[in-house]
Amino acid sequence: MSYNIFGVKVLNEYLVLGTYSAIGLAAYAATRGGSKDKQSTGASGSAPAPAVIGGQDAEEDAFIKQFLAEAQKDSK
């Protein structure tokens, strides 16, 4: 069996091969990963630097630190 796509006769076999190729390429692209420079280092490397709290004054920094500590305690 075949289909007419834009006036061109296309066999089922070619449609299936095209679909499988597209799925395979999409899976490869999604799982190939990035370069090692951009990824965070694991157990073999050093730990990433801690986030900097950017409050406008010391009181705001203390509030943010307290909020984060409570949120981490609640998530455990």
Image: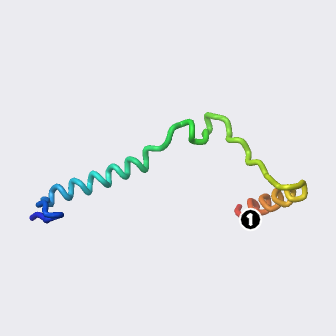
Q: How is the image coloured?
A: rainbow
| Residue shown at the point (79%, 52%) measured from the top left | 54
* Mark 1 nearby-residue class (10 Å; few <14, some 14–19, many ≥20): few
Based on the displayed image, in which of its 4 quarters is residue 15 positioned? Answer: bottom left
Q: Residue furthest left?
A: 1
Give me the residue at 32% from left, 55% from top: 23
- Which residue occupies the extreme front position in the image? 7
Relative to residue 17, is residue 28 drawn left or right?
Answer: right
Relative image position of residue 42 (x, y in whole percent): 60, 40
Q: Position of residue 17 (x, y in %)?
A: 21, 53
Q: Which residue is mark 1?
A: 74
Q: Quadrant of residue 20?
A: bottom left
**From the viewer's perspective, is 54 left or right of 30?**
right
Residue 29 % position (x, y): 40, 48
What amino acid does circle 1 point to? Asp
Residue drawn at the location 70% of the way across and 63% of the way down = 75
Using the image, determine if residue 28 lies above or below residue 1.
above
Q: In the rendered view, would you say 28 is above or below 59?
A: above
Q: Quadrant of residue 32?
A: top left
Secondary structure beneath label 1: helix
Q: Which residue is rendered at x = 9% and y = 64% of the image?
A: 1
Measuring from the top left, give residue 45's x and y in whole percent. 63, 34
Q: Is residue 61 left or right of residue 75?
A: right
Q: Is residue 66 left or right of residue 15?
A: right
Q: In the image shown, does 65 or 56 lie closer to the viewer?
A: 56
